[in-house]
Image: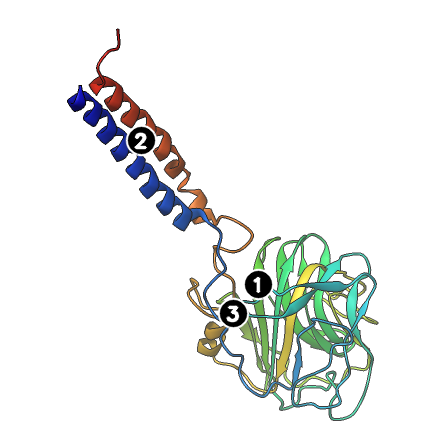
Amino acid sequence: MNHKHNSWTRSLFVGGALLVIWGMTAWAIFTPTQTAYGCASYPANPAYAYSLNNSPNVNSGTQVGAGNFTYAGNAAVAPALTVGGDNAVTLDGTGDRMNMNSHAGGTNLNAGQATQLRTYMIWFNATTTTGNRQIWEHGGATNGAGMYIQNGTLYGGVWKNDTTLSFLSLPVTAGNTYFAVLQYDPAATGVLTLYVNSTVTSTTGIGATNNGTNANAIGGVNGNTRRHDASTGTADFQGVIDDFRVYYSIMPISTLNTIFVPGGGSGCHPTAVSLSGWSTAVGSAAWFLLIPATLLTAGTAVALRRRAPIF
C-alpha cells in the first residue's frame, strides 16, 4: 500500500515540477517587456532640432532664433517613436500639423542650397498611406524641399523655379515606424540620397537651389509645396511624427546605421518585443501553449496506471 501511495506521489511531483518549469519558461518568453536597448546619440551640432513633444516647439540646434513649430488643428502629444525618447506629435489627417511662420535671415530654414549641404532626419508611423500625406515641407511651390507619402510610397526631394525638381522614393507601409533621411549635396549637379530604415537610394540632383519664401510645416502643408508629379496643394499626414533634425553636412551611411541599426540590436528604433504585446516571432511559438496540457495528461495517465484500484 505504501509502495503504491509513493508511486502516486512521485508521479504527481514529477508532473508538477514539469509544469512549474514550463510556467517559468513561458513567462520568460511571452511576458511583454520593455526593450533593453538605449538610443544611440544623434550626430552633434544640428542646425535645427525639434523634438515635436510640445507646443510651441523650440529649436535646440545651432541656428539660435529660428522659428518655433506650433500645434495646429487637433495635433496632440503622443508617445515617442524612439527608444529612450520623450514624446512625439500625433495628427489625425484632417487639418492637423505643426506650423513654422515664414521668416528671413541667417536662421531661415528656407535658405537655398548653393554650397551648403543638407541632411534632413525624421521618424514617423503613418496610420494610412493612401492619398498624399505630407511629413515635412519648407519653402513653397516655387523653391523648397519636402518629404511626403503618396499611395504607399515615400518621396523626398528638392525643387526650384517651379518645374526644376529632383525626387527619390521608397515603399512604406501603414503601422510601421520609419527613420527617414533625405540628404542633398548641391555641388555641381549634386547628389540626392534617401535613406529609409537602412535602405538607400540616390540620384543626380539639380545643383544649387534658391531661397523659399513660404511658411513651413511638419505633418501638413503651410502655404504650398510641390511634389514629384509637379502637383501642389494640401496633404495632411495621419499618424505620429517624431524628432525632426536638419544638419548642414552629409552623414555617412555608417553614421545613419548607428541611429537605425539594420536588423535591430541597438540604435534608436524599438525592437520586436515591446509593451504593446507579443512579437511576431513569439507568436509563431504558440505551440508552446500546448505543452502544459500534454504534460498534465501524461502525468495523470501515469499516476492512474500506477495507482491501485479501490474496491
Figure check: 291 above or below 227 = above
Q: Secondary structure at mark 2?
A: helix
Which residue is pictured at 31% across the width and 35% down the height?
Answer: 16
Q: Secondary structure at mark 3?
A: loop
Q: Amino acid at mark 3?
A: Cys
Proximity of marks 3 and 2: CB atoms separated by less than 8 Å: no
Give the mark nearer the N terminus: 3 vs 2.
Answer: 3
Depth-wise, is mark 3 or mark 1 nearer the camera?
3
What amino acid type is highlighted by mark number 1?
Answer: Tyr
**Image mark for residue 295:** 2
The residue where tag 1 is placed is 178
Q: CA distance from mark 1 to mark 2?
A: 43 Å
Residue 268: which disc? 3
Mark 1 closeness class: few <14, some 14–19, many ≥20 residues within 10 Å: many
Q: Mark 2 is on which residue type?
A: Leu
Q: Which of the two discs, 1 and 2, sits closer to the camera? A: 2
Q: Is residue 294 visible?
A: yes
